[in-house]
Each structure stands twice: as C-alpha cells, then as structure tokens.
Image: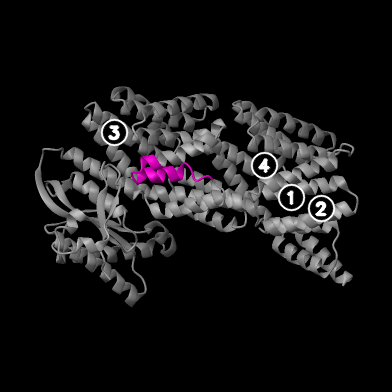
Amino acid sequence: MAQVASDLLAAGREAMVENDWTRAYDLLRQAADAGHLDAEAFEDLARSAWWSGRPDECIDAREQAFAGHMRDGHPASAALTALDLAEGLFHKKATALGLNWVKRAGRLLADEDESAAHGWLARMQAVIAFEGDEDLDRGLELAGQAYEVGTRYGDANLQALALHDQGRITVAAGDVEAGMDLMDEAMVAAIGGDLGAFYTGKIYCNMIDICEQLADYRRAGDWSDAARRWCERAGHSSGFPGVCRIHRAEIMRLRGDWKTAEEEATKASRELGNFVDFGGEAFYEIGEIRLHMGDDKLAEEAFQRAHGMGRDPEPGMAELQLSRGNPDRAWTLISQSLDSAGAPLKRARLLPATIEIALARGDRQTAGEAVSELKTISESYGSPALVAHADQGQGALLLADGNSKQAVEPLRRAAESWRANDFPYLAARARLLLAAAYEQHGSSDSANLELKAALAIFEELGAMADARKVRLALADSAHPAGSGTRTSTALMFTDIVDSTPLIGVIGDESWEQLLRWHHRTLRSLFAGAGGQEVENTGDGFFISFDQATAAVACAVEIQQTLARQRADQGFAPDVRIGMHAGEVTEIDGTLAGEGVHKTARICSEAGAGEIVASLDLVSQTELDAGALAARPVDLKGFVDPVMIATIPWA
C-alpha cells in the first residue's frame, strides 16, 4: 500500500511539473487515499487543487498540511500554510475564519527567529489593512516591512508582491505616478519569469484591477491581453483565466463589442463557479451588458446572482431601477453602497450613477455634492475617464438648473473624450444630454444632429431600448405639440426577447434567416388585421390600428402562430407585445406624442410570449377588465402609475 501511494505521489508531482493540474490532482488525491502523506505532499495536493479549479479541496488539503507541519514541529512552515488558508477563506468570503488563521500564524511566529515567514505575515497584514480596513498608512508601513524581509532572505515572490502592494496603496493614496512606477517594477519580475506562477498571476490581476479603478482602460486592456496570453501559455485552468476574462469583458463592453463581452463574461462565470468572489464579478459584468442591451429581466437576474456571491451589485442594480422609472428605489440602493465605500476610487465608480439618480429625483443639492466630489477625485488621479465623468455630471447638473448654455461646454468635452477613448455607449449618452442642452436654449438643429449621432451609435451597438427613445425624441422634435393631425388610435410594439444571446447560439446567417421569417410572418398578420406599420425597430415593430379590438386579435394571433411554429418545427423566437390606446400626432405617416412613449414603456413590461396592454386599450374591447388582474406600474417619464393587464392568448 505504501509503495502504491509513493508511486502515485511521484506521478502526481511529475504532472505538476508539466502543468497538467487536473491529472496531478487526481493522482495526488489517490495517493492520499492509498496511504499517509506528509505535510509537503498535502501542500502539493493543495496546489494542484487550486490550479485545477477546486478551491474547497485546496482548503481541505491545506488544513491537513497544517496539521502535518505542527506534528513535525515546524511552526514557521505551519504559519505559512495558515496564511495560505486565510487567503483561501477570504476568497470564499469567510472573513472571520480567515482572520483567525492570520492571528494563529502570528502566534506561531511570535517566538520564532526572523525568517521569510515573518515577511509573508506582514504582507498579509498589509493587505488586510489596505483592502479590509482602508487604512492606507498602516498598509503601506506593513508592505514596506514585508519588502525588507523579502530582500533580506532573498524571497523574490515576497519582494515582488510587497513592492506591488506598496504601489497600489500609493496609487490609492493619490500619488498615481509614484505608485505606478512601483507596480511597473514588480511587473518586470512577473513578465521576466522570475516568480512562481501563482504570484505572477496575482500581480497581473492586481495591475489590471488598479488600471480599471483608475478608469485607465487602455492600459488595463493591454495588461489584460498580456495576462490572457500568459494563462494560455501556462495551460492554467484555475481562477486566473476566468479573472482575465472578466477584465476583458469590462473593456470590451466599454468599447462597444457587447457580443464578445458577454461571451467572455459567460465563460468566466463557468470557470469561476467555485471561486465565490471572482464569480460574483463575472455575473456583475453580465448584468451590466444585459442592462445596456435593454434586457431588464436578465440584467436583474445577473445582478442578483452577483449579490448572492458577495459582490455589491451597484451601481448596476440602481441604474436598472432608474431605467424602470423608480428613482427612489434606485437612490436607496446607491446611497447604501456609497455609505460603505470609503476609498475615493471606490466612490468614483458610484458617483456618476449617484448624480443621474439624484437629478431624476429632483435632488440638486445631492447631485451638486456628488459632482464636486467626483471633480476632486478626477483632479487627484488624472484619469481621462474620471475627468469625462466629472464633466458629464457637471453638464447634467447645469442643465437641470436651467443653465443650458453653460452646460454645453462640459458636455461637449465629455462626449469628445468618450469618443477619443473609444467608449461609444458613453459617448452616445453624453450626446443625449448635449442635445437636451441645445434644445433648451433654442438650438433645435444642433440638438437634432446630436440625437441622430447618438441614434446611429445605439443602433450599431444593439442598444435597442436607447435607440427607441431617441427615435421617439426625434419624432417629437420633428412634429412638436400643436402641429400635425391629432388622432386617437390603438398602438402596438413588438420585440424579440433575448435576441443577442440567440444570435450567439445560432450564428449570424441563421439569425438573418430567422429575422426574415419573423418579419414576413408578422407583417402578414398585421395586414390581415388592418394594422399599419409605422416603424420596424430592428427585431420588432411599431404598428397602429384603427380599432383596439383588431389590435388585441392581432396580438393573440401572433402569439398563437409562434406557438404553432414551435410545436411543428421545434423553434420560434419569443416575442413580447405591448399595447395602448390614446391620442397621437400624425404627420406624413409618422406618429409621435405621449401615447407612443407610453406604448413603448408598456412593451418593456411584458415577458417572453406575453401580451400586455393598458386598461385604456382594454376598455375599448369586449375583454372583461375585472378578470384580467390589472396592476399599476410606474413607467419612466410618467408621473402617475399606469394600469396594465396581461391578456391571455393560449
């Protein structure tokens, strides 16, 4: 039995040398089951468990390694293992347990002669002071001690990590240039292959994280690509590839490549399923992408999963509530996060949404305070993106105060900065504010130019909800109140649900074929019911009817036709339908006005395969409104709740 365990152990260690971590873990696990392993063998088992994506098994193996070191009378080795255990528990959000292991390491080393282990203890205490307590002075002092110990004992891994920690703490304190110099020095050791793989990965990840906190996304992108190549060369299947994907997903989202961003974030969520802290970041990024695409329900689900894994879902969840027309709920969420975010760079990620939400609530004082704070932070750290956020916030505040002429310049600077740094979605959002500023002081032509520029960006990105709002704004500006013919009509919006992930599954060519079938089928049904196509919104339609009864009959026939297609052919896209009856302005076949806005908002309340209508429309049909379980909803842009009901069709 002992020989079997010895052979398995030797084979497992050979697999480790080849970076075949899954095979190494399987062999070492069998060795552990076949016979007694010493402390070092359990350390190897722990390393192979981590690199093969088994964090829980890693912790179990390290607990056995710790016990082995203690039995062998090696307190310094036991202390190092205790620190590794603490880090693993911190990743699982088991903070109290992790801190207890750090304290135990301290007790073990208290009566020992100085060794590299004392430096590793100081390094862990520095991280706790910096990341946990936000005590930058204490963190910097301890990181310096760790570096000195690492230098005395020739521990290159400790030296590099401690130097890196000094750099990121210095950046957090506001001295960006000095901090980045220290981090670059540590990166030289990582890139040069002087460090162990685990420490190389940590330095890569921390460097990218600091760049993203600074909103230096160009630099973050460069390091993210470098880290991804390193992971691929090393053949790692641990958490590092997944973390690299999260960073890449955020950068791709900001650059407008939402399809790639979602693919990377989804892969990361699978790779990081066992790494709670990293997995939460993956789901948060998915939520941001779905929010931009206008898919509220999937965005909310992703944010909730991120929250369940310990990741603060803000500002995403607050922005989702704001998009639904719930500024008070949004404020409750964002203010809670602000209260717990002490570090300036953490607050900087929340302040742009804080400004927007405060202005939506009419709270100009809070918005002004947030603008001032964001400007101070942007001046301290100097990142172009932080400066652009501050300019945009200042412009939005001036606009809300009625100072539209003064708002133009900061908004123009923000839009140009986003464009120059290749952040198209943010550029389009800035252009919307700039259009509002132009419109407010009577420059309608300039406003329309900005709206059209924003519309082109939204359509290219696939931000269909944003695009629809801009189209309505353009229609309203082209046909202002009092012009054209006022008429009462029944309105319908349709929309394919989850079109973007569907494209990723079936491919572009199949999507084009499906879209042609969808358009042909629905247009035939519209025509049969007497509907008039006002606009094709990409993967949906805007239709008007003379009679509400005809609109309802058409909506029911659409859903039944799609259901028959699924039964006969195995697949049909999920379509949601929203309807409303009200007065609109009609000029040359174009419809505009409050009724159009309300119908579009009602459509967004529908789920896959649902028909949702306002009671204004239901009351004009033979449907029993009392039997439909009508409910009030708050629609963005409308002061009073709107009563809607789901219409059965099966």
Q: Amino acid at mark 1?
A: Leu
Q: Residue at x 54, y 57 (%)?
A: 267
Q: Is residue 626 left or right of residue 487?
A: right
Callout 1 touching callout 3 (CB < 8 Å): no
Determine the CA span between mark 3 and mark 2. Answer: 64 Å
Q: Quadrant of residue 543?
A: bottom left
The quarter of the displayed image where residue 566 is located: bottom left
Q: Which residues are magenta?
A: 312-329
The residue shown at (64%, 43%) is 204
As helix, strand or loop, the secondary structure at mark 2 comes to helix
Which is more N-terminal, label 1 or label 2?
Answer: 2
Q: Nearer the viewer, residue 462 or 270?
A: 270
Secondary element at image label 1:
helix
For residue 66, the mark is 2
Whole-number angstrom distance, CA of label 2 to CA of label 4: 26 Å
**Residue underneath mark 4:** 203
Position of residue 12 measured from the top left corner of the image (x, y, whole percent)? 78, 63
Q: CA distance from mark 2 to mark 1?
A: 9 Å
Decide whether the magenta segment is chiefly helix, strand or loop. Answer: helix
The amino acid type found where label 3 is placed reads: Ala
Q: Amino acid at mark 4?
A: Ile
Tell me which label, 3 or 2, sits earlier in the chain. 2
User: Label 1 belongs to which residue?
Assistant: 85
